[in-house]
């Protein structure tokens, strides 16, 4: 039997530098008015991975904001068919990529060698009961529904390509990304539309979480939401990543549909 439709959504999240890195190149944003959440994992170190991740998030948020202003208490007009919302997000990601490519050119960084970033996002446009999910790179989005954790996104990494091809030969490094914003002029993002049910929890994260914390531990923490809170859950997830080594920056954002 299908679950009931949600009436509202709550968000919470945070980021941490981890136990090894000296700089946090992750960025995230929660926009309650737009019902938009974003996580970006920058690459480039001193070249500007932190700048790339912040730039991506600002560019996507700014473009979506042009098409759906925050609610004013009296409701906002619907955007229309769902494919219109997908097109808006597709253009927003394109604009973000172009903005970072432009920064690389200004700094004299050669193509493929400058700053870049992954990006994963979830947007629930007002007037719609389905969420638009989009990503580039290996930052992930999971859905926790009725005790089951499913990875909705599919990593754009060399390791994932090796898995998809049948795991022939030695596994490649898990950190080699095959798609990222800012590296080349044109990058293809993946999009999906997710029907939302009441009590769904969506988890967006950088690989500092899933690279450190087993799925079973993530499930246990998400299953306790209700007795604790979203705020306590994301903090516990980040703590688990650090307790397991904290080898990377870690960012966690949670969306719970009520």
Image: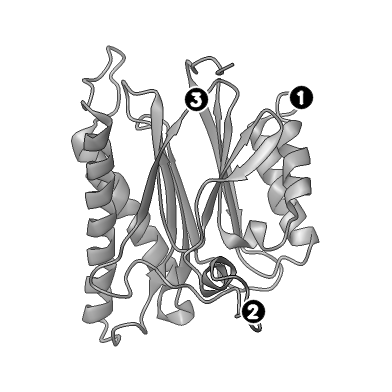
Between 100 and 123, the residue placed more toward the observer is 123
Distance from disc 1 to disc 2, alpha carbons, whole Å, reads: 41 Å
Q: Quadrant of the N terminus?
A: top right
Q: Mark 3 highlights which residue? A: 9
**Left of 19 or right of it: where is 138?**
left
Give the position of the C terminus as an image quadrant: top right
> According to the image, label 1 marks what residue?
227
Q: Secondary structure at mark 3?
A: strand
Q: Residues within 10 Å of mark 2 (few under 14, many from 20)?
A: few
Of the numbered discs in the image, which one, if any, rests on residue 69? Answer: none
- Nearest-to-viewer mark from 1 and 2: 2
Q: CA distance from mark 3 to mark 2?
A: 40 Å
Q: Position of residue 243 (x, y in %)?
A: 80, 59
Report, in whole angstroms, how far the alpha carbon at label 3 lies from the one at label 1.
17 Å
The numbered mark, 1 or 2, whose residue comes first in the sequence reads 2
The residue at which mark 2 appears reads as 171
Q: Position of residue 192 (x, y in %)?
A: 39, 43
Outermost top residue: 74
Q: For residue 250, what is the image quadrant?
A: bottom right
């Amino acid at each position: 039997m299908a679950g009931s439709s949600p009436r509202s959504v709550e968000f919470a999240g945070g980021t941490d530098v981890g136990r090894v890195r000296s700089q946090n190149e992750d960025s995230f944003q929660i926009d309650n008015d737009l019902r938009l959440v974003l996580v970006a994992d920058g690459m480039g170190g001193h070249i500007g991975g932190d700048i790339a991740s912040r730039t991506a998030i600002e560019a996507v948020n700014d473009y979506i904001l042009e098409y759906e202003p925050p609610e004013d208490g009296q409701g906002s007009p619907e955007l229309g068919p769902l494919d219109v919302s997908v097109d808006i997000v597709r253009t927003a990601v394109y604009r973000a990529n172009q903005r970072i490519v432009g920064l690389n050119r200004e700094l004299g960084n050669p193509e493929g060698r400058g700053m870049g970033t992954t990006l994963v996002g979830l947007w629930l446009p007002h007037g719609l009961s389905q969420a638009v999910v989009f990503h580039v790179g290996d930052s992930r989005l999971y859905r926790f529904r009725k005790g089951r954790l499913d990875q909705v996104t599919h990593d754009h990494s060399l390791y994932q390509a090796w898995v998809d091809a049948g795991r022939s030969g030695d596994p490649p490094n898990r950190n080699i990304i095959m798609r990222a914003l800012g590296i080349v002029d044109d990058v293809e993002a993946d999009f999906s539309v997710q029907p939302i049910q009441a009590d769904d929890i969506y988890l967006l994260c950088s690989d500092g979480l899933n690279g450190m914390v087993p799925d079973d531990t993530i499930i246990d923490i998400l299953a306790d939401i209700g007795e604790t809170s979203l705020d306590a859950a994301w903090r516990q997830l980040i703590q688990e990543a650090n307790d397991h080594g904290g080898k990377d920056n870690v960012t966690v954002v949670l969306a719970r549909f009520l």
